[in-house]
Image (spheres, rainbow, N blue to C red):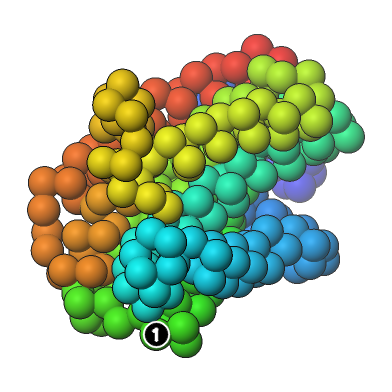
C-alpha cells in the first residue's frame, strides 16, 4: 500500500516544462558526451582537423612563402596565424552539416519527447566540437614550429592565440548551427557553408597583406570578422601584445553567439 501511495504521489507531481539553469547545463554536457562518443566511433570526423592543417600549412608556406615574403621562414608568422583562422572556420562549418544529418535521420525526433532544454541538443555538440578545434589549432602550431616558426609572443602569446582560435571556431559554429536548422539537406548546408567560408578566408589578410589588394576590396577586408581574429592572433602570438584587435575579436565572437544561438534555438524549436 505504501508503494502504491508513493507511486501515485510521484505521478501527481507536475513535470517541469522549463528546466533550470543547472539542469540545462547538465543536459548540455550529457549531449556533449553523446557527441564525443559519436566522434570516437567515427574517426573520419577528425579528418578535417588533422590532415587539413598539416597539408595546408606546408602547401601554402612552400608555394607562397618565397613569392610573398622572400623565403618560407619569413612567411611563417603570416601563414600560421592565417591557417589557424581558416581551420577554425572550416571545422565550425561541419557543425551545421552534422546537425542536419542527425535531423534527417530522425535523431532529434527522440529529443522532442524528452523534458530537456531546447538548447541542449544544439549546445552539447558545440561543446564537444571544442576538442576538434583544439586539435586543429595544436597541429597547425606544431607544424609551424617544425618548419621554423618562432613566435615572438612566447609561450603565453601562443597559448592565448590558441585559446582565441578555439573560441572563434566555437562562436562561428553557431552560424552553421542555424543554417543546419533552416536548410533542408546536409548537402545544402555544406554548399552554402563553402560559399561563406571561401570569401571570409581569402578576402582577409590570412595569406597576403591587405595592402596588396585593390582599395575597394580593402574596405571589405577591414569589416571581415575573420580579419579581426587573424589580427588579434598575430598580435598575441607574434608580439605577445594584448591590443585593441584582441578586444574587438572577443567582442565580435560574443556578438555572433548572442545573435545566432537564440535564433538557432528558435528555428530548431519551430521544427519540433
Q: Position of residue 162 (x, y in %)?
A: 36, 66
In the foreground, 237 or 261: 237
Q: Splitting the image into 4 quarters, where does residue 198 fall?
A: top right
Dividing the picture into quadrants, the one containing residue 159 is bottom left
Q: Residue furthest top?
A: 270
- Give me the residue at 72% from left, 63% from top: 47
Taking depth in this image into account, of 32 and 158 the one nearest to the observer is: 158
- Label 1: which secondary element: loop
> In the image, residue 228 lies at what x, y percent?
28, 42
Question: Which residue is label 1 attached to?
Answer: 148
> How many numbered badges does the structure rendering display?
1
Who's the residue at 56% across and 30% down the image? 196
Q: Position of residue 161 (x, y in %)?
A: 31, 64
Q: Position of residue 247 (x, y in %)?
A: 16, 46
In the image, taking residue 172 as reference, residue 8 lies left or right, namely: right
Q: In this orientation, which residue lies closer to the viewer: 165 or 34?
A: 165
User: Residue at left 67%, top 18%?
Assistant: 182
Tell me the residue at 58%/48% (across/down): 90
Q: Is residue 169 left or right of residue 29?
A: left
| Quarter of the C terminus within the rendering | top right
* Picture layout, residue 148 above or below residue 246: below
Q: Is residue 58 left or right of residue 144?
A: right
Q: Quadrant of the N terminus?
A: top right
Q: In this view of the protein, can residue 25 be seen by the observer?
A: no
Res 70 seen here: yes
Q: Within 10 angstroms of label 1, few (less than 14), some, or many (20 or more) residues?
A: some
Amino acid at each position: 500500500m505504501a508503494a502504491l501511495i508513493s507511486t501515485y504521489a510521484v505521478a501527481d507531481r507536475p513535470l517541469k516544462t522549463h528546466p533550470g539553469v543547472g539542469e540545462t547545463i547538465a543536459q548540455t554536457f550529457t549531449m556533449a558526451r553523446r557527441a564525443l562518443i559519436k566522434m570516437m566511433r567515427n574517426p573520419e570526423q577528425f579528418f578535417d582537423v588533422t590532415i587539413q592543417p598539416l597539408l595546408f600549412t606546408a602547401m601554402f608556406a612552400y608555394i607562397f612563402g618565397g613569392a610573398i615574403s622572400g623565403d618560407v621562414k619569413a612567411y611563417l608568422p603570416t601563414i600560421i596565424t592565417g591557417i589557424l583562422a581558416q581551420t577554425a572556420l572550416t571545422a565550425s562549418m561541419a557543425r551545421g552539416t552534422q546537425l542536419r544529418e542527425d535531423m534527417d535521420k530522425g535523431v532529434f525526433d527522440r529529443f522532442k519527447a524528452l523534458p530537456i532544454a531546447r538548447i541542449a541538443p544544439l549546445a552539447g555538440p558545440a561543446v564537444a566540437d571544442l576538442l576538434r578545434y583544439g586539435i586543429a589549432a595544436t597541429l597547425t602550431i606544431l607544424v609551424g614550429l617544425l618548419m621554423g616558426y618562432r613566435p615572438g609572443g612566447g609561450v603565453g602569446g601562443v597559448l592565448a592565440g590558441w585559446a582565441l582560435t578555439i573560441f572563434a571556431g566555437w562562436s562561428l559554429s553557431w552560424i552553421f548551427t542555424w543554417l543546419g536548422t533552416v536548410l533542408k539537406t546536409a548537402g545544402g548546408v555544406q554548399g552554402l557553408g563553402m560559399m561563406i567560408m571561401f570569401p571570409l578566408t581569402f578576402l582577409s589578410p590570412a595569406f597576403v597583406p591587405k595592402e596588396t589588394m585593390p582599395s575597394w576590396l580593402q574596405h571589405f577586408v577591414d569589416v571581415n570578422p575573420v580579419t579581426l581574429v587573424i589580427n588579434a592572433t598575430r598580435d598575441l602570438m607574434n608580439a605577445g601584445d594584448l591590443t585593441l584587435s584582441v578586444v574587438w575579436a572577443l567582442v565580435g565572437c560574443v556578438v555572433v553567439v548572442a545573435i545566432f544561438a537564440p535564433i538557432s534555438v528558435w528555428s530548431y524549436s519551430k521544427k519540433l
